Image (cartoon, helix red, strand yellow):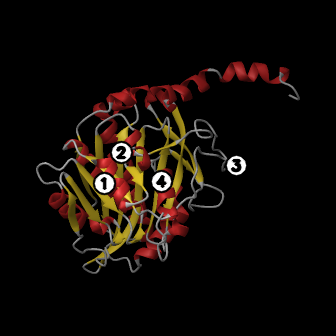
Amino acid sequence: MTDTTIRRLEVRAPSPGCSVIELAGEVTGASEAALSDAYDRAATPGTRAVVLDFGSLEYMNSSGIGLLVTLLVRANRNHQRMLAFGLSEHYRQIFELTRLDEAIAIHETEDAALAAAA
Amino acid sequence: MTSQPDNRDAAAWAQPVDRLKVSDVAPGGRNINISGRRQTSPIQGFGRMWQKTYRAPLGGVDKTPQQVIEVWKQHFPEFWPKGNSFFAPLAGIAPGEVAALDLAMPGGLKLSTGVLVLYADDESFTLMTPQGHMFAGWITFSAFAEDGVTFAQAQVLMRASDPMYELGMTFGGHGKEDLHWTHTLRSLQTHLGGEGEITTQSVCVDRGRQWSKATNIWHNAGIRSGIYMTAAPIRMFARPFRRGG
């Protein structure tokens, strides 16, 4: 499989109990380890919400969407909410098509996502 | 909303739909339990969530992953096990197309349902299930090269749609599904003249069941297909009395 998508994803904690994972570049099946590692760093004790930043996403295929589903399961298991922001119209439509928008709340901006997570 | 520079994947995804629509069904297929149904991801399913990966090495085959996917798309229905039918969309396996399925069930029953082609590019394609299908989720068929060998892979991410299907999956359904996709990969492997052991990996992603989705049973395509078949004599009798019949 192509390894162009395997790279470390940035994780930050802009507010207490809330972590942001920056989904930059490509999200495909080859991103599994990088995404899992990012979630491990984001889900510290006390994390109540994990926010996905799609602002720098360039490419995502159906395997990438599958990874988001498994990430959501991990978050639910840890009693964490999952939110998203920065989706282009295209990726927003994919969320609707795959009905991920029913489980991951979509917000326009990071501030709006963080406010909703608070 | 953010404006992003490009969406290289845009052409590979189906256009947004709220419910499935079937315009033309390939000869032999039936538009039962498809039109009007919503597509379902694993989030909308009832049972435990599973990720199953079936992988076939194509040793001795001099084809790129793209060429393998091209062949797989073209001959997809031919690789299915006997008794199960995939009625490919007339436009082929392309994003947004809907295919009809007849699946063999115990007792000689046929379960009629369908799938939406959620995603298709030159290295993979993904089929997403509608309400009433045995499982809620999708299956991605892909090909890739590793250490000089091309592999074909089918990966399912699913939950059984309702309690009845979950029971069926627990008591033999998972094994039947494994046989189905192993057979499919072996058929592809044989068609391409390849060799190598087919591997199966099953991971339970979520052991929890979503009891709030138990009402999915209303759409159960197995039950509805059974009713449809049982009512066939009545439909035949009523045909002459229908308007314009």
Depth check: B170 or B27 in front?
B170
In the structure shown, which secondary structural element does the residue marked by tag 3 occupy?
loop
Residue B124 image point, x, y percent: 44, 66
> Does any portion of residue B54 appear in the rendered image?
no
Disc 1 to disc 2, C-alpha distance: 31 Å
| Residue that label 2 marks | B158
The chain ID associated with circle 3 is B
Q: Which residue is mark 4?
A: B127
Please indicate whether residue B210 sits to the left or right of residue A60 in the image.
left
Residues flagged by tags 1 and 2 on a common chain: no
Provide the residue designation for mark 1.
A114
Secondary structure of the residue carrying numbered label 1: helix
Quadrant occupied by the N terminus of chain A: bottom left
Q: Tell me: B235 left or right of B146.
A: right
Marks 1,2: beta carbons within 8 A? no
Residue in view at x 16 percent, y 58 percent: A40
Labels 4 and 2: the sequence-earlier one: 4
C-alpha gap between disc 4 and disc 1: 34 Å
